Image: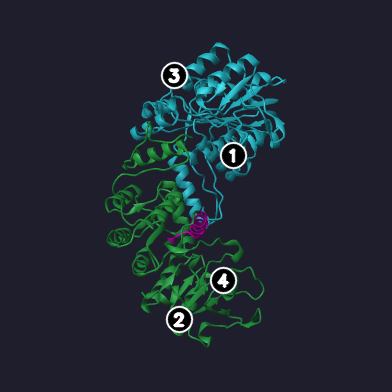
Chain colours: A cyan, B green
């Protein structure tokens, strides 16, 4: 799959803009890209008309310019037809924001768009997702600009089945000063999956660490992902939901994912040297440290601190993770007071 | 021990103020109490003189007013004499900020001040500590006002052997909106220990939760503390350093504490229903929840969230802690999308 038109698009069509409701997700996406991103944006609605002074195109095929990326935020039952339009117009790829597919029992509709897309080698992200955050090119997250917290540009790529977790991770990255290369919310991941994006980010010179929030894998998909992550030249960090029977039911209703046997998954990750974060706080810490140090630290660690209590707890943390701490030479003691 | 003069003092003597260095810990404590706390403050230095326009008393016995609390920030070898002065003057108690006692090998000096104090039933906090943070009465922490982060007044009392950990917990309390009733940094805890303060806070109507950062206990002290905590009518939360051999060496040089066998301590806490926080983040969360809910939650939990990913991870967290989550009735699914 060629992801360049999706992640560095020059032109963007937003399908499903409302002429009457500026808070519609499609309108939010249209406006934030028009005002803040480099991409050239075209609004699409089957009724045509005028939006904020710009002509609205009835169909993607009517847009006079070649479109790199289409964001589809129309009702689920209209999505197959819109994807056909995209293919016909030679669009490079799509983000399907709309929900109402496998996660609500409409597996048929999801299979239909996957078949169409596969037959035409047309990559799409989603459905049921926020899509792509790739400034300065494009930002398809349907959050108003004033509500999104933007981490600095940096070395970590995030791929998440949950848009909510992804947006929360971006806040945590910003708070902790961890830099982001790109973020992709893949939702039901009907076509573009973790594995495809691993291959993309391995080749992406902006990205040095790839991290995932995963709800579940289809049969064999988890195995393929782990094998690829093991071979990947960049650190891979995985945070998994659906660790318990109740959590498994929750992810199934969220992104129609099968969580699988978590204990097996977790031990395979450990066996293959893929980093597992047990929660989002570990994920942020691991991203921060692995974007600075790509390999395990060898040798003994010295701790310099203004607080003896923090020194003691840091020594405990090192020792409990198999790292030895060095005692500095001193007249009477090796750790400072307070 | 009567802690009222220490925790709600009306008069405060600060012993060891410098006439030439306003950044001396004693000067910091003197100024912040003079400017910001209700207590009436008197500066003491053996040389006498004038500080910021106020007369400096050569000895505590020279102060014309009865003193409730003395903060001692003089060199360790002068502390025994100053404590004798306090006793002679009928002072209610002291905070010994000075280091240079058991933690640097001067067990003799520490024993000397304990003998003096015990013989006179004179309670002192420390040595090697920040002391008492008890607004609006008094604040003996030798941190300039502009550098200290103040949580809201609230229900949690913190007792810590480390001043650094305590100040960091206050920042975390402020960030998370957890309210503080009082904070006490006990350092080497030569006289006033965790157990004494547990008895005080159990009777304190402002305090509903008592939390501890502990480096170590002397022989039998840990056992006495755990037995008292088990009987305490308020939730007790313990965060322990010195969990590993290296951490044990670190706490010994910090507050001269013997860390003891952590595994035994931890299992005794669990057995007696005393809450153990494995790190400072758990400590803050436990303080927040236990200051709202004093008993275990019964029944099944419902989760309402705008993000399906957070729903799934919350369900996982509940299930992994033995709490069952309730599935809301709905047409097709029980958890929301995104």
Asked if disc 4 and disc 1 are in contact, CB closer than 8 Å, the reply is no
The spot of residue A156 in percent (x, y) is: 59, 33
Q: Which residues are magenta?
A: B159-175
Task: Tell whether A27 sits left or right of A311.
Answer: right
Query: Considering the numbered disc 4 on the image, is that residue within a helix, a strand or a loop?
Result: helix
Q: Which residue is mark 2?
A: B91
| Residue A157 belongs to the span the image colors magenta | no
Are there few (<14), some (14-19), or many (20+) residues within 10 Å of tag 4?
many
Label 2: chain letter:
B
Image quadrant occupied by the N terminus of chain B: bottom left
Comparing labels 1 and 2, the label whose residue is closer to the camera: 1
Are there few (<14), some (14-19), or many (20+) residues within 10 Å of tag 1?
some
Q: Which residue is mark 4?
A: B29
Tell me the number on the disc at residue A23. Answer: 1
On the image, which quarter does residue B116 sit in?
bottom left
Q: Is residue A57 above or below residue B217?
A: above
Q: Which residue is mark 3?
A: A108
Label 3: chain letter:
A
Q: Is residue A74 above or below residue B67?
A: above
* Distance between mark 1 and mark 3 Cα atoms: 30 Å
């Amino acid at each position: 799959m060629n992801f360049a038109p999706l992640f560095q698009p020059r032109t963007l069509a937003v399908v499903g803009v409302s002429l009457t409701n500026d808070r519609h997700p499609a309108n939010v996406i249209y406006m934030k890209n028009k005002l803040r991103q480099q991409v050239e944006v075209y609004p699409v609605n089957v009724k045509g008309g005028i939006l904020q002074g710009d002509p609205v195109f009835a169909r993607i095929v009517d847009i006079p310019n070649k479109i790199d990326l289409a964001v589809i935020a129309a009702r689920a039952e209209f999505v197959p037809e819109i994807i056909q339009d995209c293919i016909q117009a030679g669009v490079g790829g799509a983000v399907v924001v709309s929900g109402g597919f496998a996660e609500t029992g409409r597996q048929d509709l999801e299979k239909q768009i996957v078949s169409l897309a596969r037959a035409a080698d047309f990559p799409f992200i989603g459905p049921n997702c926020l899509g792509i955050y790739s400034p300065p090119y494009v930002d398809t997250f349907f959050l108003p600009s004033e509500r999104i917290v933007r981490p600095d540009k940096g070395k970590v790529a995030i791929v998440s089945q949950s848009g909510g977790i992804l947006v929360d991770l971006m806040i945590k990255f910003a708070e902790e000063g961890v830099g982001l290369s790109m973020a992709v919310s893949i939702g039901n991941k009907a076509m573009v999956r973790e594995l495809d994006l691993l291959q993309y980010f391995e080749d992406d010179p902006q990205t040095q660490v790839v991290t995932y929030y995963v709800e579940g894998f289809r049969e064999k998909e988890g195995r393929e992902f782990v094998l690829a992550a093991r071979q990947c030249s960049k650190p891979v960090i995985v945070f998994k939901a659906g660790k318990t029977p109740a959590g498994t039911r929750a992810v199934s209703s969220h992104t129609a994912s099968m969580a699988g046997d978590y204990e097996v998954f977790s031990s395979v990750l450990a066996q293959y040297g893929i980093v597992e974060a047990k929660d989002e706080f570990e994920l942020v810490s691991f991203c921060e440290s692995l974007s600075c140090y790509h390999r395990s630290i060898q040798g003994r660690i010295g701790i310099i601190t203004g607080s003896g209590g923090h020194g003691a707890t840091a020594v405990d943390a090192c020792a409990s993770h198999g790292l030895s701490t060095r005692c500095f030479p001193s007249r009477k003691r090796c750790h400072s007071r307070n």
